[in-house]
Image (spheres, grey):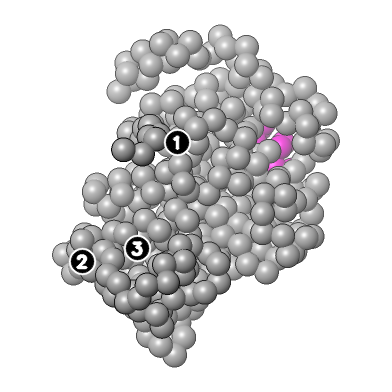
Amino acid sequence: MVAAKVNRRAVLGLGLGTMAVAGAALATSGTAVAQQARPRQADVTTASAACDVIAEVYRAETAAAGGTWSSLVSVVDAAGTAVPSVQESIDEVVEAYSVNKIAVAVAVLDKIDRGLITLDQQVEVSAEIIANDGDGVFYLDRAYPSQVTVGHVLALLLTVSDNTAVRLSGLVCPAAELNEILVAKGYPQTQVSPVANPNRFFLGRTTPRETHDMLNALVAGTLLSAESTEFLLNCLRAPVAFTDGIRREMSSDERLRVATKAGWFNDGRNEAGVIFDLDGAPVLTFALFARGVRDEGNFGATHPAVQARSVMGRVFLDSVTPLTSPLENREIPDYRPRNGG
């Protein structure tokens, strides 16, 4: 595994000798940190050094955005240990919003792993189950009833954050069972909120620590089967997955190194995920939950909290690119666009 990492870095011309500047994308962000000289990647040769740079940009960007942040960010060191870089109210129970769609997918995939349902099992998309809120694609169909597979539901749940997919997930994993699965896996604070209909729920709450730890368990292969782990990570790393925040200031290849899920509602703007090294081993995990930030009605890329995450994302990636994680590689998916046909 180590030899493969060295060889690929040599081919790409990267490593400790690079003169690239970490966080070069900050030049126009307008924050205090953007005005400071960023450390060269050549200077960031350890997890500890990366943690210092990450903590600095986090402090600057969250201060500029305002609001209340509850966050946990860690970097994997040479021994494979997750070293905390940012720890702010990490055990505070927060509204997860669509970040908890990861937890929903984990529960459904757990049932698949146990043979209770299958990925190709079909569910009915009725007119009554459609969430007409503008998040997702099911509401655009205008042709019901139809049939889709559980795999299709999960793919839309995790990439375009389809809210009808939440309701469809509830058909195969009701709220009470979903919460029981999460508790059994060690996440008692990561729970959806049941309603009168047992197959419906609001997305509920979590803590930065539990979301962070769930992601680490996922990439470690201890949360789900190998097949379900690959399915979930490939959805979160897909080009069509969320790109307005952490992944915004990245190339298409760089985005494929980031598995991410965002969530937003009212004044909340959240994002959590994993950044992989050049060979696909997890090297940084982030769980960022913000609330009370100005411009509450703006759910686009210009919201202050989302802009802050885009600056952080560039620095996060640059800071860990010189590092080699000793954890298991997860093959980075390819992106090869086609022109139809």
- Report helix, strand or loop for mark 3: helix
Please say whether residue 196 is visible from this viewpoint: yes
Tag 1: residue type? Answer: Leu
Vertical comparison of 36 with 311: above or below? above
* Direction from residue 112 to residue 281 in the image, left or right: right
Question: Label 1: which residue?
Answer: 256
Question: Label 2: which residue?
Answer: 121
CB under 8 Å between callouts 3 and 2?
no
Quarter location, residue 84: top right
Please, what is the dominant secondary structure of the magenta stretch?
helix
* Direction from residue 272 to residue 328 in the image, left or right: left
Label 1 to label 3, Cα distance in Å? 22 Å
Q: Nearer the viewer, residue 326 or 23?
A: 23
Q: In which quarter of the image is the N terminus?
A: top left
Quarter location, residue 219: top left
- Which numbered dot is residue 153? 3
